[in-house]
Structure formats: structure tokens, C-alpha cells
Image (cartoon, rainbow, N blue to C red):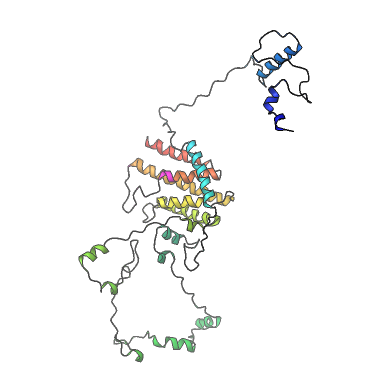
């Protein structure tokens, strides 16, 4: 069939010169203009007017009910004089939630896409602490050096045989092997009564310097850095410029969730780390005076990025962990607003308000959990808790 003979469906419905086929009108119809308003002179013109008027009628009609009573719209209950008026801007708007959820889903898709660049990981270096090391992860996120979040492993203690244990119970001394005696021959732990040190023959030409007694508390690392050993500090000239430089504490920049780190974090790893953040937020709320326990914007970026690594379909236990994280963020906002209402200032040692996790970051975490994993009832919990703070402030 040629293209000239094909016609659109609309043209076939509105045309009066269509070919007769099964299910269509087969009687002849007059070909008159649509503006025809005269009296039909024959059956052809009458059928034209009937078809023209039928196209103007609605497809479905309803008979008016003479007994129908219009229902009055329900009026919203007005709060009494003693009841506080609840603000409607406590929660983010529906438009903001839909926009954020759409962009967050796009971010999740883009973050898991493979790239052209192929990166071969270096097995000799460690990028992050182990999954079960919660304290080391806190030091890692705070930007502490690798010596703190990746300490050397402790050597394994030699196992004691049953024969040695039996001799120890009987009070008998266990004789070391010949190799052990040879290795420990140069180590002398017996001090003469006069206080002098016995020098072995192999070290007769060496001088032994007296050891300086130091306080154990002074040699421990602090949040601002590790102190210099006393033997090193004694050789350094103590000029005024050096004293001024040493007085400045070390400032560590927090680590950010880079794509290189995210490549090594899967769904189960992300859920485990999000559980750590829930613990840290609750610990901050329970013990506000605890030093170095502030939840910062860097922690909020980590939580946001870790949520992008969580699968769409999760188990009931994993859902409970995400709900606990959302509730912890709600409690963090409630506590911050309660302190503002009471006019409390930040305590000594706390970070500034600009660095701490703000309400916008909390809303992003809550919106991601409620939108992607269908926990919309948490919005009612947030509104209830925040409205109580607003009521107490009024």
C-alpha cells in the first residue's frame, strides 16, 4: 500500500468519505460544511447533522441527583488560648524533598558507574582502618596520622606447652633451651649492691651515659601532637623563634570521602560504618562534655556518601540501623534548638557552629532514609519532637 493511501486515525474518524468497513457507518452521508445550519432536505443531510452533533456530546453523562446535599469542607481546629500554635515550617517542604530525592538517586547511580581509568590498588599501603576498629576509624576521620589509626600489630606471645604449665604448677623452674641461653647471655638484669653496672667484655671500650628520669605522663601523645623525646630536645637550641613555633598546636584536617576510598566500601561495609556514626551521635548527646566528640560537617559528608553505597533492597535489621541513624540526627537537631532556646553558649573546647553538623545536613540524611527506603513515618516523629521544642519556647 502506498503512503498516499494511508491516513491518520483522526482523519478517518472525522471524514465523511471514508471507505465502508466492518463496524462503521455504511449508509451514505451528505458532504456538507461544518457551518451548515439549514433544515435537512433528505436523509443524507440528516445523517450529516446527527454525526456532527454526536461528536460534540460528552462520552459520559450523569443524571443530577435532586436529593444531593453539598458537604461543607471540614474546618481546621483552631488552637485555644492555652494551646501553642505549631509552626508549619518545622519540616522541609514537599517540593524540596522531591527535588533532593531525585538528585540523590542520580548521585547514587553516578557514584557506582565504572570509569575509563583503571586504578590498580597498592597492596603494600593501607588506605583505611579495618571495619571492626571503631576507635581507629574515629582517629582516621579526624585526620590523625597513620601511626595512630594503623598501629603496628603486637607480636604474638609464645605458647606455653603443657609440660611447662605442669612444671610451673609444681613450682619447678623451666630450663631454657641452649639457643635461648646464648641469645640472653648479653642481657644482665642483676644489679650489684654497690649500684654500679657490670660491663660485658665485648663492650669494654664503650661509655654508658646515665639515664635521665622522665615523667611518663609527659611522654604520652596528646590531641595536639606527640612530644619530642628529652634526648632530642636537649640538643636543640632554645631560641625565642623556636619557642614560638613549638607553642603552636598541630591542626589536623579531617579526611573526606574521596572516590578512591569509596571504591573499597561495599554495602555491608557502609552499613557497619553508619552504625558507628549512630553510636558517636548518641554518645555526643549523652555526654556533651566529652572532649573531641563533636559531630562536624565532615562527618555529615561521610554519612551522605555512605548512604549512596547502601543497596535499594535491605533486610529488616539493616532498616532498623538506618532508622536509628535518622532518629539520632533528629535528636541532634532537637538538642541544638533546646540549647538555643535556653541561650546557652558553646562550652570551652567545642568547635564553632560553622564547623558542626547543621540542620541542613541532618535533613539530607533523614530525607535520604525516608525517601529511598520508605520510612516516611519518621517525618511525624521529627515534627512531634520539634513542635515540643517550639511549644516550650513560646
Give x and y (percent) for residue 64: 64, 16
Q: In which quarter of the image is residue 62?
A: top right
> Looking at the picture, how far across and down is residue 297, in whole percent?
40, 50
- Asked if residue 282 can be seen in this view, the reply is no
Residues in magenta, as a range: 343-361
Numbered disc total: 0
Residue 250 left/right relative to 18: left
The residue drawn where x is 50% and y is 49% is: 324
Residue 190 can be seen in this image: yes
Q: Quadrant of the N terminus?
A: top right
Residue at image coords 70%, 22%: 15
Label the magenta part by its dominant secondary structure: loop
Picture layout, residue 191 above or below residue 111: below
Q: If the image is split into quadrants, where does the C terminus sit?
A: top left
The residue furthest left is 240
Residue 391, image quadrant = top left
Say which of 113 and 393 sits in front.
113
Front residue (pair 124, 130): 124
Left or right: residue 145 compared with residue 97? left
Left-right relation of 123 to 6: left
User: Residue 348 magenta-drawn?
Assistant: yes
Q: Is residue 176 left or right of residue 216?
A: right
Q: Is 365 above or below relative to 20?
A: below
Q: Does the magenta stretch include residue 219?
A: no
Residue 67 versus residue 239 in the image, above or below: above
Residue extending furthest bottom? 201
Q: Residue at x 41, y 88 (%)?
A: 185
Image position, residue 281 (x, y; %)? 44, 51
Amino acid at each position: 500500500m502506498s503512503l498516499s493511501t494511508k491516513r491518520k486515525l483522526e482523519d478517518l474518524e472525522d471524514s465523511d468519505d471514508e471507505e465502508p468497513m466492518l463496524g462503521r457507518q455504511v449508509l451514505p452521508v451528505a458532504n456538507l460544511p461544518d457551518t451548515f445550519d439549514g433544515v435537512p432536505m433528505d436523509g443524507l443531510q440528516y445523517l450529516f447533522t446527527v454525526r456532527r452533533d454526536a461528536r460534540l456530546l460528552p462520552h459520559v453523562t450523569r443524571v443530577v441527583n435532586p436529593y444531593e446535599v453539598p458537604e461543607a469542607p471540614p474546618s481546621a481546629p483552631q488552637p485555644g488560648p492555652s494551646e501553642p500554635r505549631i509552626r508549619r515550617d518545622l519540616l522541609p517542604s514537599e517540593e524540596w524533598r522531591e527535588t533532593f530525592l531525585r538528585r540523590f538517586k542520580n548521585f547514587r547511580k553516578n557514584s557506582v558507574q565504572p570509569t575509563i581509568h583503571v586504578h590498580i590498588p597498592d597492596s603494600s599501603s593501607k588506605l583505611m582502618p579495618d571495619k571492626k576498629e571503631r576507635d581507629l576509624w574515629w582517629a582516621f576521620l579526624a585526620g590523625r596520622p597513620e601511626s595512630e589509626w594503623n598501629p603496628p600489630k603486637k607480636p604474638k606471645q609464645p605458647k606455653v606447652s603443657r609440660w611447662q604449665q605442669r612444671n610451673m604448677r609444681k613450682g619447678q623452674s623451666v630450663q631454657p633451651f641452649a639457643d635461648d641461653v646464648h641469645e640472653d647471655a648479653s642481657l644482665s638484669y642483676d644489679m650489684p649492691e654497690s649500684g654500679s653496672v657490670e660491663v660485658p667484655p665485648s663492650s669494654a671500650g664503650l661509655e654508658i651515659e646515665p639515664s635521665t628520669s622522665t615523667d611518663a605522663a609527659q611522654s604520652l601523645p596528646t590531641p595536639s601532637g606527640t612530644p619530642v623525646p628529652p634526648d632530642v630536645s636537649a640538643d636543640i637550641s632554645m631560641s625565642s623563634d623556636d619557642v614560638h613555633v613549638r607553642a603552636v598546636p598541630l591542626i589536623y584536617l579531617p579526611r573526606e570521602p574521596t572516590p578512591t576510598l569509596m571504591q573499597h566500601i561495599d554495602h555491608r561495609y557502609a552499613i557497619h560504618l553508619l552504625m558507628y556514626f549512630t553510636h558517636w551521635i548518641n554518645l555526643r548527646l549523652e555526654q556533651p562534655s566529652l572532649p573531641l566528640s563533636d559531630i562536624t560537617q565532615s562527618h555529615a559528608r561521610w554519612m551522605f556518601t555512605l548512604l549512596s553505597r547502601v543497596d535499594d533492597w535491605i533486610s529488616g535489621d539493616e532498616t532498623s540501623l538506618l532508622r536509628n541513624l535518622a532518629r539520632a540526627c533528629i535528636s541532634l537537631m532537637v538538642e541544638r534548638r533546646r540549647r538555643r532556646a535556653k541561650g546557652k553558649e558553646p562550652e570551652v573546647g567545642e568547635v564553632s557552629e560553622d564547623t558542626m553538623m547543621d540542620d541542613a545536613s541532618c535533613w539530607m540524611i533523614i530525607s535520604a532514609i525516608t525517601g529511598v527506603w520508605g520510612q516516611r513515618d519518621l517525618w511525624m516523629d521529627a515534627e512531634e519532637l520539634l513542635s515540643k521544642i517550639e511549644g516550650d519556647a513560646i
